Image: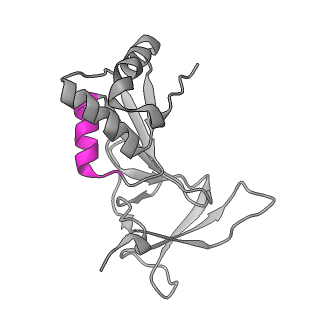
Amino acid sequence: KQLILSSRHLKPEFIDSFLTEIKQFSPHVLQAYPSTAFVLAGFLNMTGKKLDIPYVYTGSEMLYPYQRELIESTIGKVVDFYGMAERVALATECLHGNLHVNSDYSYMEIVDEQGNATDDEGFIVGTTFHNKLMPLIRYQLSDRTKWKKGKCLCGSYYPMIEPIMGKYEDIIY
């Protein structure tokens, strides 16, 4: 019960076919990289068309505010998640816009440059709970964030983090 479309074919000459397939399938959720959903939203915006998909589930890349704005105005409500191939940390965005760390997936820490726990901005360090053959313990990523204080209106008891600030090595000086 899923429709898989190739983002490599998300080009002007195929956009009508994409839209026909998506509308005919009538999905409740569109799962895509932020950049792919943004390209689709751009085509919709240029042609004055819209899709009516309740949720757009994005992840595996940075989601920028301008991307979210266009996707939500042409496709549906964006719900983002944070994860990586190493699978040592996972955070999912709730409908109130907060990123909740999935503590049942892994143990996540935020550390400073010296590897000490911090409440300020720091590197994400994760320990996997589910990879029994090759567990990664205190695996430091180059992604940066900080803990978000308070309780979320969604009622989740999972801890919250601020939006990911990107990979440390992605910064150009």
- Residue at 30% x, 28% y: name it: 75
Image check: 56 left or right of 132?
A: left
In this rendering, would 65 be left or right of 159?
left
Question: Quick check: 173 above or below 68?
Answer: below
- Image vertical order of residue 149 relative to residue 53, above or below: below
Residue 144, picture quadrant: bottom left
User: Which quadrant is the N terminus positioned in?
Assistant: top right
Query: Residue furthest toward the top?
Result: 24
Between 13 and 60, the residue placed more toward the observer is 13
Q: Position of residue 59 (x, y in %)?
A: 45, 47
Which image quadrant is residue 128 in? Answer: bottom right
> Residue 32: horizontal and vertical position, in percent?
45, 38
Q: Is residue 15 above or below residue 114?
A: above
Depth check, front residue: 88 or 120: 88
The majority secondary structure of the magenta stretch comes to helix
Please state the extent of the stretch shown in magenta in the rendering: 63-74
